[in-house]
Amino acid sequence: DGGVIAPPVGERALPGITRAAVLELVRGGALTGRRVVEAPLTLDELQAADAVLVTSAVAGLRDVVAIDGAAVGRGRAGHGGAGAVEVLRSAFDALVAREAQPRASDALRASDALGAREAAPGASETGE
């Protein structure tokens, strides 16, 4: 029906930040006209899907191109769900870039402050 079906947390899915971000992007309209349904999925449903994606904090958003040797969707990464995979991946990458920038700047400032404190004459480990 054009929806995004995700297994509920605990049903072979962990409550990861990447999973939550991707589902929130869909709920927020990143995929126009699509809604999120959290429901258990069978192997047959996965194999018949237009696209299957997995999320991971390390790998981000990844396509599943085959299950048990049978192609999923078109059987090529980035080509499932009538362009939905590309749209969702772009939205996710943009979100990561927006979120990472302030944190990277904060980390650099903290590192610079630590380096300045360590370089100051008479500095101790407690900063006194």
Image (tube, rainbow, N blue to C red):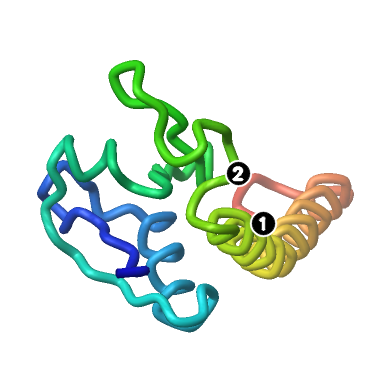
Along the line of sight, which residue is nearer the eye, 69 or 6? 69
Which secondary structure lies at badge 1?
loop
With respect to residue 106, does 62 lie above or below?
Answer: above
Q: Position of residue 105 (x, y in %)?
A: 77, 63
With respect to residue 107, does 46 lie above or below?
Answer: above
Residue under the image location 38 percent in, 67 percent down = 23
Circle 2: is it few (<14), some (14-19), or many (20+) Cα within 10 Å?
many
Residue under the image location 43 percent in, 42 percent down = 56
Q: Which mark is residue 78?
A: 2
Which secondary structure lies at badge 2?
loop
Residue under the image location 59 percent in, 58 percent down = 83
Mark 2 or mark 1: whose residue is earlier in sequence:
2
Query: Which residue is identified by label 1?
Result: 127
Q: Which mark is residue 43?
A: none
Along the line of sight, which residue is nearer the eye, 99 or 54? 54
Q: Position of residue 120 (x, y in %)?
A: 87, 51
